[in-house]
Image: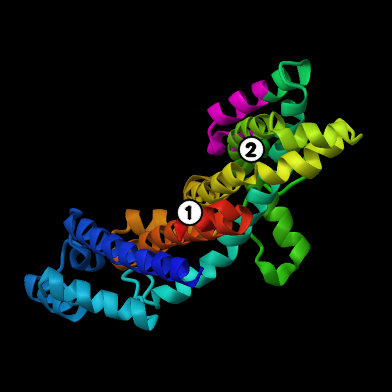
Amino acid sequence: MISILVRRILSLIITLLIVSLVIFTVMDLLPGDPAAIMLGTSASPETLAALRTQLGLDQPLPVRYLAWLAGVFRGDLGQSYTYGVPVAGLIAERLSVTLPLALMAIVISVLIAVPLGVQAARRHNGVFDLVAGLFSYVSIAVPAFWVGLLLIIFFSTMLGWMPAGGFPGWDAGLLAGLQALLMPAVALALPQAGVLTRVARAAVLDVMNEDFVRTARAKGLSDGVAVWRHAVPNALVPVVTMLGLQFTFLIAGAVLVENVFNLPGLGRLAYQALSQRDIVVMQDVVLFFSGLVILMNFLVDLAYLAIDPRLRANAQ
């Protein structure tokens, strides 16, 4: 088990290094001069050259990449061109909105999809299965930002039950913060719940035909108890896989939803950095998103090994 863990960690580190090089190179190829954007079109060439030297933009690409990478390892992500503050502080501040939003969305997705998928598998080809399939197809087809707009129109504009957007900050209280994130979390969760419903249904259907489930029923267990106690735990591997992928999709999907609801999260920060050509913030946020994807894949691999002992034996 230790050797498996070491190999996974080494693979994670190598992947992160490759991704960081790709991100830095792509960001460097984007059109536009950050110094010119900061100073405006009326700046003299001498002033532009001085600022480029101050920002280190006059250095060769390998030198700038190694300096940036060394800063990342030290926890120094550089200074934002636009805000003039450390990027690490900006990311930490915005993460306090995006991370709870993604966690709320994944919880809502699981609470909707797993019971729906399990019951659809139990009532295979029945009315409930058809309704669950219709929900799955519709929720997958509808974009999250459009769901967010519908929620704002109905619950905020028409009924006045929920705030239309903005975030009061966690200092205003836990309830106020969760209330501000509820509609964005639902908007993010519904498309993912549709996907997870199909995965849970298919996984449970496969396991329900196994001998141990039939044996459990033959021993007198009801169909519901046999499915939830024996079939569902053995169908967790594809569900866990999809949950890991969905978490990263939710973080990335927050770019649009946070702009719809005017939330000061990482997605909105990435959008603002792109529009303002703030390369330092852009590359650090993209690296954070990429690192999160890689880390989630790593955790999913570990979850596989914990759930299924056969995978541990095959990985030796």
Q: Is residue 22 magenta?
A: no
Identify the disc placed on residue 246: none
Q: Residues within 10 Å of mark 2 (few under 14, many from 20)?
A: many
Residue 151: x %, y % from top left: 67, 37
Residue at image x 49%, y 72%? 2
223 versus 23 height, above or below:
above
Residue 171: x %, y % from top left: 70, 72
Between 189 and 234, the one lying in front of the other is: 234
Identify the disc placed on residue 314: 1
Quadrant in the picture for the C terminus: bottom left
Q: Residue furthest right?
A: 220
Q: Residue furthest left?
A: 45
Q: CA distance from mark 1 to mark 2?
A: 32 Å
Main secondary-structure element of the magenta-colored stretch: helix
Q: Which residue is mark 2?
A: 193
First to last magenta residue range: 133-150
Residue 298: x %, y % from top left: 47, 60
Q: Residue furthest bottom?
A: 74
Q: Is residue 300 visible?
A: no
Which numbered disc, 1 or 2, marks the residue that appears first in the sequence? 2
- SS for tag 2? helix
